[in-house]
Amino acid sequence: MSGNDQDHANPNPDLENNAKTEFPEGLRVLAVDDNVVCLKLIVTLLIKCRYKGWNTNYGVNEVEKVACGCGLQMAFVTATTKPTEALEMLRKNKESYDLVITDVEMLDMDGFQLLQTIGIEMDVPVIMISANDDTESVMKGVRHGALDYLVKPVRIEELKNIWQHVVRKNLLEQAKSGTGKVTMDQNSMSSKRQRDKEKEKEEETKAQSDEELSAPKKHRLVWSKELHNKFVDALEQLGGGSKAVPKKILEVMNVPGLSRENVASHLQKFRNLLKKDSKNPEMNLESENNIDPSQPNRHISDLTTLPTNNLGLNNIGDPGMAALFGSQNQTFSDYLANRRQVHQNSLLLPHVADQVRPNVQNLVFGNFPPNPISTWNSFPRPELNGMRLHSYVPPSFSAGQTDPSTMPVGLVPYSRPPGTFNLVQMLGDGSTQLSQISQPCPLAMLGPSSSQGQNERRNLVNFNGRGETGGFAFEIRGQITDESSRNGQFVQNQPSENTERERNGNYNCSSPDDDLSAMVRQFSSNGPPRL
DNA sequence: AGGCAAATAT
DNA sequence: GATATTTGCC
């Protein structure tokens, strides 16, 4: 992205002056997203970047207004919720925008078409914001004229650099029209920028320690099968009751990178699920077999980042307890045993495998078939039919791991055999008002799935009609680096040192409007912009 | 912390 | 629009 112009030696007007020359009005961005929060984030980050000319009166209300498609213009960040609107705006005001930022999720078939129109025909720089694993969309976007893409959650460093695309474009234009001088200026700008890189970094660090306003959002943790298994194992180990509290569970799970909050959240969901389930214990079996086999799996690209483990491979829908229990006459211990058996036979990560404790169940079910496949494959796995796993697996990424039949699987307590062990009680805290839980049992929601839209990239089982699991997801997403995955670590946040800080007072794009307004104020008085 | 529930993200 | 996950609050 930075290209080669940094090699042009040119002692020159400093970055700021150039910036002023180039962007007297600041960077004019047209953001395309249906998510107001994202727009706020962009705005905030841009403020944080101190792009020149930021209109400090352009508060969040305005952003929202714009985001809703009501008001437009008058700001350096204009938002629209639809690519069509964006195109329209661009056509009306060709010269009004320096670049367009769009969420790839906004780009359906038509969206890409529009992208092409904007990026290529209209020659407006387009930058996509994409989920980290959305390789296909990114490539598609690039093929349709996008210059670059930012990975969610967008980092300030990236936003800081987007202006280069504008400069580059101008460079080309000026070169064409034979305007040499500005070209040199621009070159120097980039050059200077390169040299300032380190300096900026310092500033950045400093700024972060100041406010942490632009700390990127955390990646969402997806509870993989293994992770969930470990979770349940931990519950068992703790014997439920008052001991099964997030902190303890976390301890027992012993998963690097996992936070207490993560566990607490999962525990909450788990409990809710059990409660829900205990309310309609019967409606599981039937729905179990209604999983739509045509729904592709998602996040396949993550497979490539999980070379030695199967964390990313657990994209298969859990048959649920119903499928395993069959007659639903077994006990919870049976469930546990079954679950453990499957668990045991999974291709666990070394460190995960280490977690598997020998215990009574292990002894009882000690002689597992050597091949895990036979263990669970005998259960109905309708969701494995078809190509749930193939749609998004570039051949080169498959690495022989796309065969669903080799996917290890564990069991999730979607249901509980009636009249047996009550995990709800076991888990204690029966304080939740059951009456508040009105959502249907996940298993009851199994059904044909057709939604492919924005969930296309998700490697989740479709227990419902929209590409989500009704219960637990089966994959770790986010920043799983080769390194971290190799170590079997679940890296949820930036693998940075400031995890703790991020966890606390960082900017959260869900901040109340006032926060953003405050930020606007703050940054508006924060000295000259650097662009 | 722990447990909820509201807020967000997908 | 339904869920999954994160955040905020008590």
Image (cartoon, coloured by chain):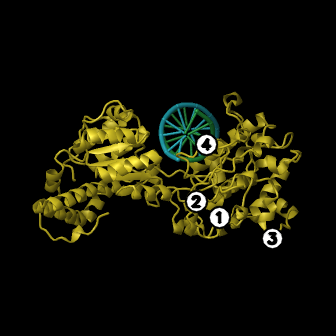
Chain colours: A yellow, B cyan, C green
- CA distance separating discs 3 and 4: 36 Å
Residue at the spot x=75%, y=60% of the render?
A: A343
Q: Marks 3 and 2: CB-CB under 8 Å?
A: no
Where residue A402 is drawn, which disc sits there?
1
Q: Is residue A209 left or right of residue C6?
A: left
Q: Position of residue A146 (x, y in %)?
A: 36, 55
Which badge, 4 or 1, is on the more N-terminal residue?
1
SS at mark 2 in the image: helix
In this view of the protein, which residue sits in the foreground, A172 or A204? A172
Q: Position of residue A7 (x, y in %)?
A: 21, 72
- CA distance separating discs 4 and 1: 22 Å
Which residue is denoted by mark 3 in the rendering? A370
- CA distance separating discs 1 and 2: 9 Å
Q: Marks 3 and 4: CB-CB under 8 Å?
A: no
Which residue is denoted by mark 4 in the rendering? A466
Q: Marks 1 and 2: CB-CB under 8 Å?
A: yes
- CA distance separating discs 4 and 2: 17 Å
Dot 3 falls on which chain? A
Task: Tell me the crowding category of disc 2: few under 14, some 14 to 19, or many 20 or more residues within 10 angstroms, Cα based.
Answer: many
- CA distance separating discs 3 and 1: 20 Å
Please identify, in this view, whether the residue under mark 3 or under mark 4 is nearer the observer. Answer: 4
Which residue is denoted by mark 2 in the rendering? A300
Dot 2 falls on which chain? A
Quadrant for residue A277, please give it. Answer: top right
SS at mark 1 in the image: loop
